[in-house]
Image: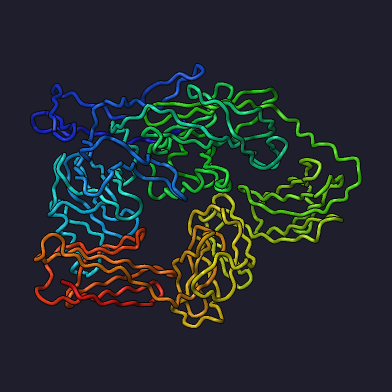
Amino acid sequence: MRRSSLPSVQNRSSADGTRRGRSAPHVILRTRPQGQHRAPRIQTGVLILWAGIVLVLASFPANAESVYAWPMDLPRAITSSFCEYRVGRFHAGIDLRTGAVGVPVRAPADGYVARVRCSPTGYGKAIYLRLTDGNTVVFGHLNDFCPDVGEYVRSAQHAAQTYTVDLHPEPGAFPVKCAQIVAFSGQTGVGVPHLHYEIRDAQERPFNPRFLDIAWPDTTRPVIRKLLVAPAGLDSSVNGDIVTFVCDVAGGSGGEYTSGPIRAAGRIAFGVDIVDPANNGANILGIHVLRTIANGEEVFRIAHDRVSYSHINNGTVAYHPFMLDKGRFLLQWRWPGNVCEIFAQTDADGWFRVPGAPVEVRIEAGDFFGNRAALTVPIIPDAQTPPAPPAQPGTGEGAVDLACVGTWLVVTAAFTAPEPESPVLEVNGLVPVHGSPFRRINDTTFRAGIVPGPSMHEIEVRVIHDRIRPYARTVHVFQRGEGDRTVTIDGVTVNVKSGSPYGALFLRTYPASRGSPSSIPMRGKPLRIWPASMPIDRPVDVAFPVPEDAQDLGRVQLYRDTGSTWQPVTTRRTKDHLVMSSRQFGIFAALEDDVPPAISEIAIERGADAHSKRPAIHAKVTDIGSGIADITVTCNGQWLLMAYDPERNVIEWEQDEDLPAGHKEFLFTVTDGAGNTTTANKIGP
């Protein structure tokens, strides 16, 4: 059995053998006998006996002495957990509730400031502390830094005349001691006021803070909301079908859940929609450990212990990417190409072969404090005998749907009335002999699957039936490790890297409707790249021809339809093409942003001190197209350091220096991503 090694935990001892700990807000010194050290945690600890099986989940009582000091003088409450679900990635830390802006943030141990960043997006203002044990702590979404670091940052911002900076001071420039205030909490970057708290090992890999006994109150069991059961291929089935099955679960008393019986054949695997309520249900967190047991043996296990930034996007296939409209199903199998440590806890791939007799499968979950829940799934072997065809002649009209549900394609033919005659499936001009011809699901529905061969680059699908309109589709296939390959479809050139597919990547392009309304003109026609839910590892390069009706190419870029608006996509312009690199498919179009950004609600407020040389200055800035790219504000020609909050569409002066005496004229200049510029003047006090 393969287990990932865990971060080392080192004691931080002074010369007299004392070990620093902290019970907020004071520093407490505890002594250990000379030579006695806390043992590194090599595996999660507490042994939980479920159905006679010992499960290692967590060995961290809530009142355990923490290796690190708690970073705020507030009640311990977290609003997001380690490796919690994020769209297309894992959450790399924990989020602490602050309730306000400006709460002092303290160093959890001795070390020094290794990095400081300021950005309007992401972690916003963030500070990175390299600690004496070799780990790095990241605090994000800050409002400000401690005075000496803040002055260092502002000097760099003024020198470059930009708010966005990424600085790496010398190791000895800003030493810190345990419990020293290093910053103040805020809401910069993304989200409401909170503190992002992330711990990385010496190789810069974020890891579970429970390995350092960092604790918060949690006595609530995880909640299992839904079950997902997937067939492994076309020789398997779930409830007589080759598509993934989703159902609700019952129970919950004492953490025990059950599902209805599942008929299955061949190999199957499981996923659960599961959450961990926290703070009396005010927040929904993720779990720590999830495993599947059948016939007394472990089928698969994941553990949210550590994740490398080089693999953090494997979160795309940690949850079933094609079932997000039905729930967030944390998978109990390793999707092809998923190499993150979370899914490398066992040598097994998670696929379970259904035995010849009924069996109960048990899916067990634990949170970071050992609170647990379990789901029992009765599995009944299925002989895969299709339903008998209806006796009456067919009269209904048929329609065909082509779907991608994983690493193969599913073709569904559905009729409006009972249909005795199966359609004929042709793949690349041949009726499949191996694989799956249409199988009857019920009186009106037939289903077939298509698994691409190792050298198959195109799949031409035709469905033939007297009462189905002629149906033909071509799907391009890319498989992981086969090398980079480029195809041109309808004038659009797509380059798929060798490492882009998770297993197999399927691709079709065809004209789309105009999609969501836009306040800026669309150039050319929108294009759908199918399937929208296709998981992508390395970004795919897509080159669209420059639209003939473009007025100013410098203002034209690609946008993705989110369902409610058009979101700009980073676009490289060449003489003949607009090129994007993307991990997402969907509907794309070229839009020409000819609308400048808007500046409104400019306010310059003296505050209580009428003679203040640092008034509060803020304004609202908005853009309906390419987004805000640059903001410059001056007072009598003096550049002012303005912070930009894109979620609130607000800019605010940092009030970091005195303004000139006497008459003051403020000039606001805002430029969007297409180069459109708006200026506004304001006479100040």
Q: Identify the residue at horizontal 40%, vertical 50% (top origin).
A: 310
Residue farthest bottom in this picture? 551
- Going by the image, does 287 lie left or right of 546? left
* 371 shown above or below 129: above
Q: 574 or 395, which lies in front?
A: 395
Q: Position of residue 155 (x, y in %)?
A: 16, 64
Q: 166 or 8, which lies in front?
A: 166
- Going by the image, does 379 lie left or right of 5? right
- Going by the image, does 494 lie left or right of 61? right
Determine the image quadrant of residue 683.
bottom left
Q: Identify the residue at horizontal 29%, vertical 75% (top origin).
A: 669
- Going by the image, does 528 lie left or right of 195? right
Q: Position of residue 153 (x, y in %)?
A: 19, 60
* 60 shown above or below 398: above
Determine the image quadrant of residue 655.
bottom left
Q: Quadrant of the C terminus?
A: bottom left
Q: Position of residue 480 (x, y in %)?
A: 55, 53
> Which color scheme did the rendering employ for the protein?
rainbow
Q: Identify the residue at horizontal 20%, vertical 62% (top origin).
A: 654
Q: 250 or 288, which lies in front?
A: 250
* 539 shown above or below 244: below
